[in-house]
Amino acid sequence: MTMDVTVIKQASGKDCDEIWKMINELAKYEKMESSVEIDAERLRTDLEKGKFDCLICKLKDDIIGFAIFVYTFDIEGGKKMYLEDLFVKEKYRRQGIGNKLWSALTNKCKEKGCSTMEFSVLNWNKNAIKFYLRHSCQDYTQAKDKLLFRFVTGNL
């Protein structure tokens, strides 16, 4: 665990510059740098308009992790949470920060009346897969024989 106290809190517009930097760190790690099309200002605008939600982990005045998510609905269980990304800066990993973010996320999921939380993980990201399996998550790909598809509005 980190020596200093970390705090999980709701992100605000003023946090978006640092969140955007971490999004780019994540994209680099995932070998997907070219896929980040938004900038910090768009992130701020969308957060402030409620298009997504975000929890951050702070250590003193530094944001060291985040979880971006939205609420959605399905006919199986009703309201659910979709986790877009959970990220902790590399030098703070393996110190319980991801566990703290995960706990805050699952509490928010319950508080908001969600039946489930869903997310995708790159199949080569073994550390992330192990993390989620340790937290009792199911590989839905195999459990439900579902595939993930994406439609890009620019294709219209």
Image: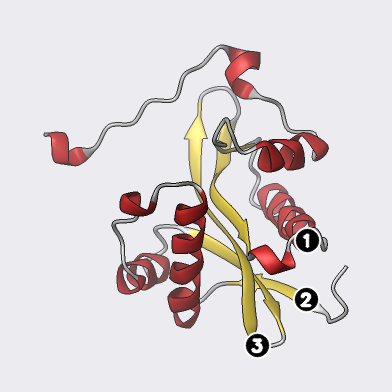
From the viewer's side, name the closer residue of 68 and 110.
68
Q: Residue 116 appears at what percent x and percent y?
A: 65, 36
Q: CA distance from mark 3 to mark 2?
A: 10 Å
Query: Which comes before the other along the chain, label 1 or label 3?
Result: 3
Please give the residue where the numbered disc 2 appears in the rendered image: 6
Residues 129 and 78: in front is: 129
Q: Quadrant of the N terminus?
A: bottom right
Task: Tell me the amino acid under the disc marked 3.
Answer: Asp
Residue under circle 1?
100
**C-alpha distance separating marks 1 and 2:** 9 Å
Q: Secondary structure at mark 3?
A: loop
- Check the image and report above or below for 153 versus 100: above
Whether residue 89 is situated above or below residue 143 in the rendered picture: below
| Mark 1: few/some/many CA within 10 Å (<14, 14-19, 20+) | some
**As shown in the figure, which amino acid type bears the numbered disc 2?**
Thr
Disc 3 target residue: 61
Pointer 3 or 2: first along the chain: 2
Residue 25 to residue 127: above or below: below
| Coordinates of residue 35 in the picture (x, y in percent) | 33, 49
Q: Residues within 10 Å of mark 2 (few under 14, many from 20)?
A: some
Residue at point 56%, 38% (across, down): 119
The quarter of the picture where residue 78 lies is: top right
Number of numbered callouts drawn: 3
Secondary structure of the residue carrying tag 2 is strand
